[in-house]
Image (spheres, rainbow, N blue to C red):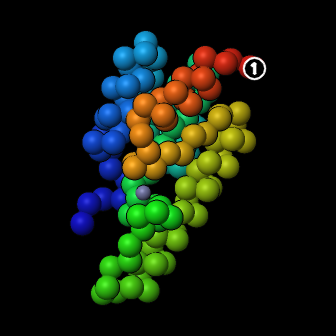
Amino acid sequence: MRAVRTHGTAPELDLRRELHRRGLRYRVNHRAIESSRGRADIAFTRAKVAIFVDGCFWHGCPQHATTPASNTDWWVAKIRENQERDQRATGALAAEGWRVVRVWEHDDPVVTANMIERLVRSDHR
Ligand SMILES: [Zn+2]
């Protein structure tokens, strides 16, 4: 099994490529706040926008989540734990003034990039 937090997965790379193509520059695997929870997959430090690309299995995507047939209880608990950790990370970043965007690995990178670009370019601070 892969590690819970994998970086540079194919969906994340697709999204990064799409953002880069638009002239947006960002940091990867950036520790946005002084907490291990605050590590964003993609971060726009000036606009304070943090992006997480969540894997459908590990983060319990409502469309694609599957539960392994063996050790079912353990997996259900594990994935719930991940979701709770995601929520805490989002809350911790928001408390420091970051706008947090969580996308699923199944999301269309172009649609996602549109949304992120609007957010990053609308500097309403
Ligand atoms: Zn999904």
Provide the residue designation for mark 1.
125
**Where in the figure is residue 26, as x and y percent of width and height?**
45, 23
Q: Is residue 12 above or below residue 43?
A: below
Q: Residues within 10 Å of mark 1 (few under 14, many from 20)?
A: few
Q: Quadrant of ligand 1?
A: bottom left
- Quadrant location of the C terminus? top right
Amino acid under label 1? Arg
Residue 66 shown left or right of residue 49 in the figure: left
Residue at image position (32%, 34%) is: 14
Q: Is residue 43 above or below residue 105?
A: above
Foreground of the two, 2 or 70: 70
Asked if residue 34 shows in the view, the reply is no
**Where in the figure is residue 10, as x and y percent of width and height?**
28, 42
Residue at image position (60%, 23%) is: 118
- Quadrant location of the N terminus? bottom left
Q: Is residue 75 above or below residue 81?
A: below
Q: Is residue 118 above or below residue 86?
A: above
